[in-house]
Amino acid sequence: MKRNAAPPDPPPFDGRPAATGAVTRGAVRLFREMGAACLLEVTLKTGRRADVMALDRDGAITILEVKSSVEDFRTDAKWEEYLPFCDRFYFAVPVDFPVEILPDAVGLVVADAYGAAIERPAAQGAMNASRRKALTLRYARQAAERLMRGLDPGV
């Protein structure tokens, strides 16, 4: 069998504006360095999709809501609906974002395409055991489905 050259790497974030993709990439890099496994666009039981969900080694769940612009933040009325589905919640924004418009009660990550920093820690929440189990299973199934689709896209 003849070996072909490896195909080029696919773009990391298709369908997302460049600023959103850069912030997402940097935030994911940070949480991976902190030992968390991240999954993008995780669908919750409510039908809402979390931009980034991070699952750490202890089973704690963090949701990051990526905001690429002031308009993006001001037109988003749904972010509070994510709070019951995580132990920690952060807004992840670009370096030039006017962070003073964000609520003080949630965490803040400032990111670019190469990395990120936690500028304000998130308050520690507490999910009940049944919601944590259901959400962890949902996370695992979505990750596995994506892996299977990657291995066999026709399915």
Image (tube, helix red, strand yellow):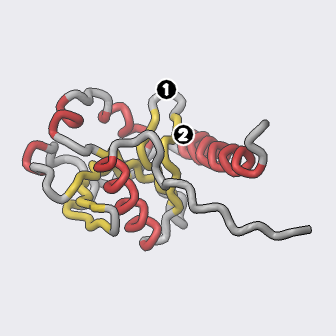
Residue 4 in which image quadrant: bottom right
Residue at image position (56%, 42%) is 135
Front tag of 1 and 2? 1
Near-viewer residue (31 or 112)? 112
The x and y percentages for residue 38 are 50, 57
Near-viewer residue (13 or 34)? 13
SS at mark 2?
helix
Answer left or right for 88 relative to 155.
Answer: left
Could you tell me the amino acid type at mark 2?
Arg
Callout 2 crowding tier (Cα within 10 Å): few <14, some 14–19, many ≥20: some
Residue at image position (63%, 43%) is 142
Answer left or right for 31 relative to 115.
Answer: right
Residue 115 in which image quadrant: bottom left
Q: Are marks 1 and 2 in contact (CB under 8 Å)?
A: no
The x and y percentages for residue 134 are 60, 40
Circle 2 sits on which residue?
Answer: 131
SS at mark 1?
loop
Circle 1 sits on which residue?
Answer: 46
Asked if residue 73 is positioned above or below residue 13 in the image, the reply reads above
Mark found first going from the N terminus, 1 or 2: 1
